[in-house]
Image: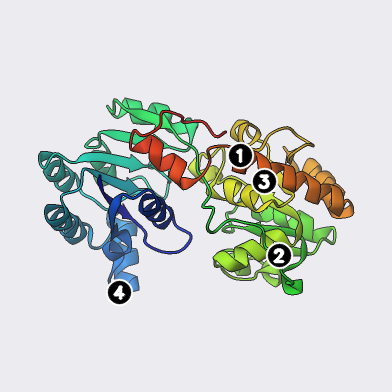
């Protein structure tokens, strides 16, 4: 089999994880790095997205991908997220006999992502896999016939426990992710009661309540150390994306961190029973109460994290497992 991936070819991104998984399965794989669609002056790129809701180099990247496919002749094109491939390019790929699949890592109908060109492009795909049940109906209403729920995953070569000495990464509470507006009050409440909070991701420095706890972006090695040396790994969904779980859900679990997760149906399905493999919260009161328990019971929290790690690793939850489903090599869409 030959597989062409259109995705971000960078550490920590789904495109890179899927590429590695394909390589390990002996699949002849190439990747069209979607970052090229955003090449250009930063100001111009920003204006193009804000005014036209499209990547600056949508047309040229689409043509480059078609040219790559004409040379490589893949059996399948697998795009990730809001892939910068225009509808006419996808129709051209289909005439070449290529099966077209989209792994919808971002919600196409969110306020930030919604764009006419991409909704038109979605109608050209043979199959769409979405990690959020909340928008299955939207895809069906768009006219897509093959739409399936497929949760996020973890990469065994990246997401594992790191017990090396890393005193600078210890914390009561660690969170890895962006400073969405709805997240800031929750984090601020943890800081206010005196927890040592470590924040990794974009924009935390913009808020007075969180600025002193902002640590910047975490590469893969840092992510492992942060999650392996915290008493409470806070696991939140992105509400603007209508998420029931997130990429971080599996990554935190695979590292074996003590998880305190936002209470959603998908989180409970993935992470297991409350008090056994994870703790859940529904409001600020429960967040503070359960976080305090984890901070004051580190041995119990670590044991809980280890049970969660076994649960995730003993299931079919790697990016390779997800790739098998998307390529029709497995019919198991479960998160176990």
Label 3: few (<14), some or many (≥20) within 10 Å? Answer: many
Q: Which mark is residue 41?
A: 4
What's the coloring here? rainbow
- Look at discs 1 and 3 and give the one toward the viewer: 1
Q: Nearer the viewer, residue 263 or 97?
A: 97
Q: Which mark is residue 309?
A: 3
For the residues marked 3 and 4, what is the alpha-carbon distance in whole angstroms?
Answer: 43 Å
In this rendering, would 208 be left or right of 297?
A: left
Mark 3 vs 2, N-terminal side: 2
Q: Which residue is mark 2?
A: 198
For the residues marked 3 and 2, what is the alpha-carbon distance in whole angstroms?
Answer: 22 Å
SS label for mark 3 = helix
Residue 261 shows up from this direction? no
For the residues marked 4 and 2, what is the alpha-carbon distance in whole angstroms?
Answer: 33 Å
Residue 60 shows up from this direction? yes
SS label for mark 4 = loop
- Look at discs 2 and 1 and give the one toward the viewer: 1
For the residues marked 2 and 1, what is the alpha-carbon distance in whole angstroms?
Answer: 30 Å
Mark 4 vs 2, N-terminal side: 4
Q: Which residue is mark 1?
A: 314
Horizontal and vertical percent for residue 106? 43, 46
Horizontal and vertical percent for residue 217? 56, 68
Q: Are the residues at dot 1 and dot 3 in contact (C-beta closer than 8 Å)?
A: no
Q: Nearer the viewer, residue 254 or 236?
A: 254
Looking at the image, the residue that sits furthest to the right is 296
């Amino acid at each position: 089999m030959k597989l062409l991936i259109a995705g971000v070819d960078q550490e920590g991104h789904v495109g890179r994880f899927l590429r590695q998984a394909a390589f390990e399965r002996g699949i002849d794989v190439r990747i069209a790095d979607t970052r090229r669609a955003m090449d250009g002056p930063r100001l111009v790129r920003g204006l193009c997205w804000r005014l036209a809701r499209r990547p600056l180099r949508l047309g040229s990247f689409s043509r480059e991908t078609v040219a790559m496919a004409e040379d490589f002749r893949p059996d399948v094109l697998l795009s990730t997220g809001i892939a910068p491939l225009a509808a006419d390019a996808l129709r051209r790929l289909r005439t070449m006999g290529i099966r077209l699949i989209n792994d919808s890592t971002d919600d196409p109908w969110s306020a930030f992502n919604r764009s006419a060109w991409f909704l038109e492009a979605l109608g050209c795909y043979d199959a769409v896999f979405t990690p959020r049940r909340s928008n299955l109906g939207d895809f069906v209403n768009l006219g897509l016939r093959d739409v399936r729920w497929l949760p996020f995953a973890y990469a065994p070569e990246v997401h594992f426990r790191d017990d090396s000495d890393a005193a600078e990464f210890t914390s009561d509470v660690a969170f890895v992710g962006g400073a969405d507006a709805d997240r800031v009050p929750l984090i601020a409440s943890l800081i206010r009661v005196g927890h040592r909070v470590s924040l990794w991701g974009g924009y935390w420095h913009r808020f007075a309540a969180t600025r002193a706890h902002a640590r910047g972006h975490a590469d893969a090695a840092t992510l492992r150390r942060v999650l392996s040396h915290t008493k409470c790994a806070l696991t939140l969904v992105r509400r603007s994306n209508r998420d029931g779980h997130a990429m971080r859900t599996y990554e935190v679990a695979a590292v074996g961190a003590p998880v305190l997760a936002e209470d959603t149906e998908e989180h409970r399905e993935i992470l297991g029973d409350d008090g056994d493999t994870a703790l859940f919260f529904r409001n600020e009161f429960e967040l503070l109460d359960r976080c305090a328990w984890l901070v004051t019971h580190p041995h119990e929290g670590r044991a809980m994290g280890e049970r969660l790690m076994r649960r995730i690793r003993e299931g079919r939850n790697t990016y390779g497992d997800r790739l098998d489903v998307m390529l029709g090599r497995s019919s198991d869409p479960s998160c176990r």
